[in-house]
Image (cartoon, rainbow, N blue to C red):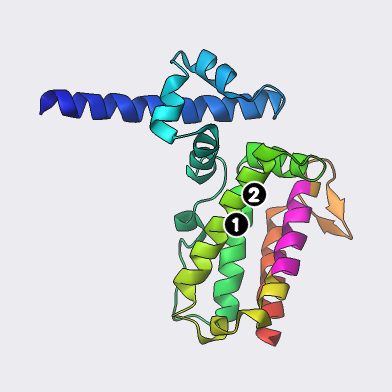
Amino acid sequence: MVNDMTKERNKEKTKQALITTTLEILAEDGFANLGVNEIARRSGVNKALIYRYFKSYKGLLEAVAKSGDLFPSSHEILDGIDLNESSAAIASQIFRNYITGIRNRPIAQKIMAWELNQNNKITEILADAREAVSQDIFHFLAPKLPELKEPEKIHYTTAIVGSGLLHLCLRSISASHWDGVHLRDEKEWQRLFAAVEQIFQIL
């Protein structure tokens, strides 16, 4: 029993080490040096453990994307949501949580900026993992918000609003303003989120 518990702790410790190392490589080198051999070498573990614990290289990248260290998790995005609020207020809070999470993660900003001009297996896996989180949130909210039972009414709006906010977030890396909005001023971001709520009130 003790041996089983020790093995499980070692397994989880190794899995976390592999996830952490993958994040470090992404932060330092981007996609260029990311691969099974480099991850195993920097982690100091046998690369066979990647396949044992994550089934595949893809499985490791999916675990990294869902860890909450790279991108906001569904729990983080839904934090503070009050289902008694209006749908517009809920939508605004979700976007607030998501964009704030991205703004607090420089590595996420780097990766999402790279994705704009790089298309490879790694970017596809990470993008698919983010999309899965979005769908999890939608399926959680759909039974509770009547408006979401006709998703065609809001999907295009959320795509436009979400991509617009994300563009401003990524733009703030290299520019301080966009169309008169100070992208590095917290008060300006609060005004942006208030504008999001106004948009959804119109729907």
- Residue 187 in the image: above or below residue 112: below
Residue 167 within the segment the image draws in magenta: yes
Q: Which residue is mark 2?
A: 127
- Residue type at mark 1 is Glu
Residue occupying image coordinates x 68% and y 41%: 123
Q: Image quadrant of residue 9?
A: top left
Residue 161 within the segment the image draws in magenta: yes
- Residue type at mark 2 is Ala
Q: Nearer the viewer, residue 29 or 85?
A: 29
Identity of the residue furthest to the right in this view: 179
The answer to whether residue 73 is left or right of residue 184 is: left
Q: Main secondary structure of the magenta part?
A: helix
Spatial CA span between label 2 and label 1: 6 Å
Q: Which residue is mark 1?
A: 131
The answer to whether residue 20 is left or right of residue 150 is: left
Whether tag 2 and tag 1 are in contact, CB under 8 A, the answer is yes
The local crowd at label 2, few if under 14, some if 14 to 19, many if 20 or more residues have their Cα within 10 Å, is some
Quadrant of image for the N terminus: top left
- Residue 4 in the image: above or below residue 152: above
Q: Secondary structure at mark 1?
A: helix
Looking at the rendered structure, which numbered label has been put on residue 103?
A: none
The answer to whether residue 154 is left or right of residue 179 is: left
- Residue 71 in the image: above or below residue 35: below
Q: Position of residue 110 (x, y in %)?
A: 71, 38
Q: Nearer the viewer, residue 33 or 83?
A: 33
Q: Nearer the viewer, residue 91 or 172?
A: 91
**Magenta-colored span:** 159-170
